[in-house]
Image (spheres, coloured by chain):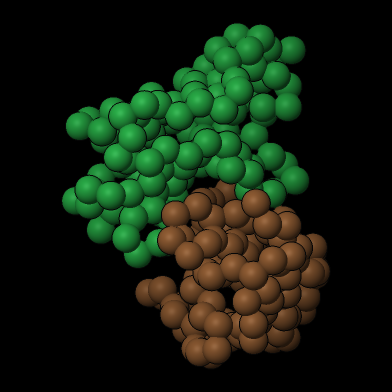
Chain colours: A brown, B green
Amino acid sequence: SAVISQKPSRDICQRGTSLTIQCQVDSQVTMMFWYRQQPGQSLTLIATANQGSEATYESGFVIDKFPISRPNLTFSTLTVSNMSPEDSSIYLCSVSGLRGETQYFGPGTRLLVL
Amino acid sequence: AQTVTQSQPEMSVQEAETVTLSCTYDTSESDYYLFWYKQPPSRQMILVIRQEAYKQQNATENRFSVNFQKAAKSFSLKISDSQLGDAAMYFCAYTGANSKLTFGKGITLSVRP
């Protein structure tokens, strides 16, 4: 499986600010995803990061709040914009191959918004 | 839409004993995959085991095995010879044609020394 890293691993931010989370993979992958895990909850898919085109967002998530970039097959960023305390969560990226059947996860970014 | 149900919020097992975690799912697809992921306090999501729906044989990975009952849409995880390092949150997950993962709510497993 690919080695996946995320930066930052954790951060504490003030409300109204924005934070960009990076996801880097050590090999080219077809699909990249971003998830949110609120405290004590399961994972919820935010969007699929598409290389060279706009991300595909799930219901309840919008591009203005969670802009995503994917400039190549090994890197993606997720920005959490205009943050509020409700955005305090763990944000995880995942990757999968061409068929998309198995996803492997990065270590996650723990975000606390004050 | 596909759903994944983990009805037990938490379980406890004695070290070296065996424990089974339950999961049921609902889908109209015939080709899909099922997974168990482990999330320790470090929050890293670790793939434990994977089952292809078209395979009748239950998947096994060392001390971890599944009981896949396709007709009943049941997918339980058995952990043998439990170790202290097995203590974590365990998530059952499903993926089908759209390649998106649907997760259950998770179960917290504690291991008693």
Residue B57 appearing in the image? yes
Instruction: Check the image and report above or below for B72 versus A108.
Output: above
What residue sits 51% from the left and 26% below the top? B60
Q: Position of residue B16 (x, y in %)?
A: 66, 9
Camera-nearest residue between A50 and A93: A50
Instruction: Check the image and report above or below for B33 versus A114.
Output: above
Left or right: A80 as drawn, with respect to A45 = right
> Can you say which quadrant of the picture contains the C terminus of chain A?
bottom right
Residue A38 appearing in the image? no
Q: Where is residue A78 in the image (x, y as percent from the top left)?
A: 64, 78
What residue sits 65% from the left and 51% below the top? A1
Quarter of image, res A74: bottom right
Q: Where is residue B90 in the image (x, y as percent from the top left)?
A: 55, 37
Quarter of image, res B74: top left
Camera-nearest residue between A28 and B76: A28
Instruction: Check the image and report above or below for B6 versus B14.
Output: below
Left or right: B48 as drawn, with respect to A106 = left
Quarter of image, res A23: bottom right
What residue sits 38% from the left and 74% below the top? A59
Instruction: Check the image and report above or below for A84 versus B8.
Output: below
Camera-nearest residue between B96 and B72: B96
What residue sits 68% from the left and 57% below the top? A2
Count up the numbered dots.
Answer: 0
Q: Where is residue B13 in the image (x, y as percent from the top left)?
A: 59, 15
